[in-house]
Amino acid sequence: FALRLMKALYGLKQSPALWNGRIDEFMGGQGFKRSTSDSCLYTSGTSDKWRMVSLSVDDLLVTGTDSVGTQIFRTALNDAFGDCTWNNNCSSFLGVDLKYNQVSGSLKMSCVGKIDGLFDKFPALQK
């Protein structure tokens, strides 16, 4: 699932710090722990039922094996932040193309589209 929060986060000098504090407090209240190696990554659960959230400003990528916990989390996000837009079939996140194979359980990640876009924008890079 991918989420885009539709709130006014921009314009104030203190906005990033306030947002970071607010989302960190919210995530902790939902039982998530912030990663010590990546402050944008939150995890929750056990080895057989887990959830993971990757956060980049106001975009969240939510994944895991705990579908019930994920649905509860989605409801809590909507209640806390209001105008959330969910994409249940996320095909890209922050310029990375995502392809999930349900049969094999594999996830293929690619930046080809982003790289092709750079070549289109800067043709001199192709030489």
Image (tube, grey):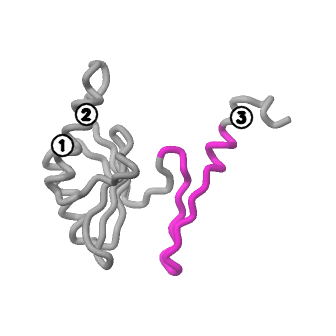
**Residue 105 at x, y percent in the picture:** 49, 76
Please give the range of residues in magenta. 94-117
| Element class at badge 3 | helix
Q: On the image, which quarter does residue 62 sit in?
A: bottom left
Seen from this angle, which residue lies furthest right?
127
The residue to which callout 2 is attached is 7
The crowding category of the residue bearing disc 1, from other C-alpha atoms within 10 Å (few below 14, some 14 to 19, many at least 20), is few
What amino acid type is highlighted by mark number 1?
A: Gly
The image quadrant where one finds the C terminus is top right
Q: Is residue 79 magenta?
A: no
Q: Is residue 44 above or below residue 12?
A: below
Dot 1 or dot 2, earlier in sequence: 2
The circle drawn on residue 120 is: 3
Q: Nearer the viewer, residue 36 or 116?
A: 36
What amino acid type is highlighted by mark number 2?
A: Lys
Q: Is residue 111 left or right of residue 51?
A: right
Dot 3 or dot 2, earlier in sequence: 2
| Element class at badge 1 | loop
Q: On the image, which quarter does residue 87 sit in?
A: bottom left
**Residue 54 at x, y percent in the picture:** 37, 52
CB-based contact (under 8 Å), mark 1 and mark 2: yes
Q: Nearer the viewer, residue 96 or 36?
A: 36
Q: Residue at x 27, y 71 (%)?
A: 67
The image quadrant where one finds the N terminus is bottom left
The circle drawn on residue 82 is: 1
CA–CA distance in space, label 3 to label 2: 32 Å
CA–CA distance in space, label 1 to label 3: 37 Å
